[in-house]
Image (cartoon, helix red, strand yellow):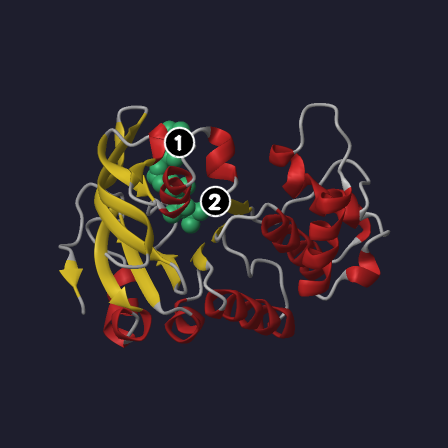
Amino acid sequence: MKGTVLDVRRVGLRRNGRCVLDDVSLSIMAGRMTGILGPNGAGKSTLLRVLLGVLRPDAGQVLLDGRDLSQWHRREVAHRIAYVPQGHISLFPYTVRDVVALGRVSYTPFARKVGAEDAAIVADALVRLSISHLAARSYTDLSGGERQAVLIARALAQGGRILVLDEPETGLDYGQQQRLYALLRELADDGYAIVATTHDPVRAAVAFDHALLLRCGRVMRDGPAAQVLDAQGIARLYARGPDDECTGAASPEEIS
Ligand SMILES: Nc1ncnc2c1ncn2[C@@H]1O[C@H](COP(=O)(O)OP(=O)(O)OP(=O)(O)O)[C@@H](O)[C@H]1O
């Protein structure tokens, strides 16, 4: 499909003998914000790890720019896909500039210091996130929202055009969430492919272009966010039911 940068095709994955993803397909497209939603244990984080190439599917495949993800060198993947973890707290009091510079590690030969070009890229990322004033501050002293901005700056400095975020709004107040989603929209409008898990279906219906609803490792719905996350879709996604223990799964439903 035109604009597809990551193509998840009928992926299945077992962990410790348990099926955690079953026949999951999803197209991640440039310029689009894709949300992955589902109850606890639905397989959202597992799917993100498959997208990042950290977990390899047992069935199906993931194509990055048309080539199987497992065939790419890790460094090449790092230059294309950046991960923004959830509520990350560093144990070391690195400065904000140093944390963002970690995005350049895969470009820097071993033991070489960050060069002038890397420093300029780091500075640009700080400007983009409006956090240049924090550059010399210790990352460990920042608020949750500031840390989130730093991690997104690090992802931008990494140079990839695919951003994968794990529950990015966690711990942010309403205003910070609004600003976060406005920023992600700006990035998508600039051509970035944004893919994020979230536990907020009401916001996701408005903020995302596309949504994949997972239940028990299977796709329950997949389509335009506002359509799949209507009242009925949300109710079905989070309803208690016989598949609460994930012994069965809802039938997939295509919405276009
Ligand atoms: N290493 C593992 N071994 C066995 N089962 C696992 C392993 N990792 C994850 N699982 C199971 O896979 C299922 C999906 O987990 P996952 O973390 O992807 O869910 P999630 O949708 O991200 O949940 P949450 O919303 O709670 O973060 C869960 O039932 C989990 O217990």
Q: Residues within 10 Å of mark 1 (few under 14, many from 20)?
A: some
Marks 1 and 2 close (CB-CB < 8 Å): yes
Q: Which of 65 and 34 is in front in this view?
A: 65
Describe the element under mark 2 as helix, strand or loop: loop
Choose the circle earlier in sequence order: 1 or 2: 1
* Image disc number at residue 46: none
Residue type at mark 2?
Arg
Residue where numbered disc 2 is placed: 80
Q: Name the quadrant containing residue 213.
A: bottom left
Residue where numbered disc 1 is placed: 72
Gap between marks 1 and 2 measured at Cα: 10 Å
Tell me the quadrant of the picture where the N terminus can be found.
bottom left
On the rendered structure, is 149 left or right of 40?
Answer: right
What residue lies at 75% left-to-right and 62% top-to-bottom?
Answer: 131
On the rendered structure, is 225 left or right of 167?
Answer: left
Q: Is residue 210 above or below residue 164?
A: below
What residue lies at 72% left-to-right and 66% top-to-bottom?
Answer: 130
Residue 209 location in percent, x, y? 36, 69
Residue 197 location in percent, x, y? 43, 55
Q: Does the residue labelled 1 lie within 8 Å of ligand 1?
A: no
Q: How crowded is mark 2: few (under 14 residues within 10 Å), some or many (20 or more)?
A: some
